[in-house]
Amino acid sequence: MMSMEWAGYLAATMTTLAFVPQAVKIIRTRDTSSISLGMYVVFTTGIALWLVYGIALGSMPMILSNIVTFILSATILGLKLKHG
């Protein structure tokens, strides 16, 4: 079972890291014209629900990765709402 825990950490790290370059670009440039408001509302809500699910399961890979991704996604959503 321990090897599956490490698989979870690896998967969580990879999927979170895949999101980081886009988030950094948007945060730096404040340019949100090419992203969909609806998609980010749904995505951010989905990440929040994955976080709740991870907490319910006590899955640290899910909890940690979804905290990071939620913060990044919520920041982008906030910038989209502020800068259109």
Image (cartoon, helix red, strand yellow):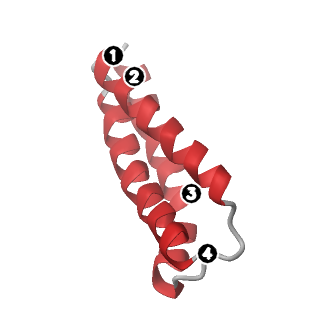
Labelled pair 2, 4 in contact (Cβ < 8 Å): no
Element marked by disc 2: helix
Q: Earlier in the sequence, mark 4 or mark 1?
A: 4
Q: Earlier in the sequence, mark 4 or mark 3?
A: 3
Residue 40 position, x and y percent, is 59, 53
Task: Please say if 35 is above or below 47.
Answer: below
Residue that numbered label 3 is attached to: 18
Residue 7 position, x and y percent, is 46, 30
Amino acid type assigned to the residue bearing label 4 in the image: Thr
Q: Give the crowd class for mark 2: few <14, some 14-19, many >=20 residues within 10 Å.
A: some
Task: Please say if 75 is above or below 57.
Answer: below
Amino acid type assigned to the residue bearing label 3 in the image: Ala
Which quarter shows the N terminus?
A: top left
Residue that numbered label 2 is attached to: 53
Amino acid type assigned to the residue bearing label 1 in the image: Leu
Residue that numbered label 1 is attached to: 57
Q: Give the number of the mark in front: 2 or 1.
A: 2
Q: Earlier in the sequence, mark 2 or mark 4?
A: 4
Element marked by disc 4: loop
Element marked by disc 3: helix
Residue that numbered label 4 is attached to: 32
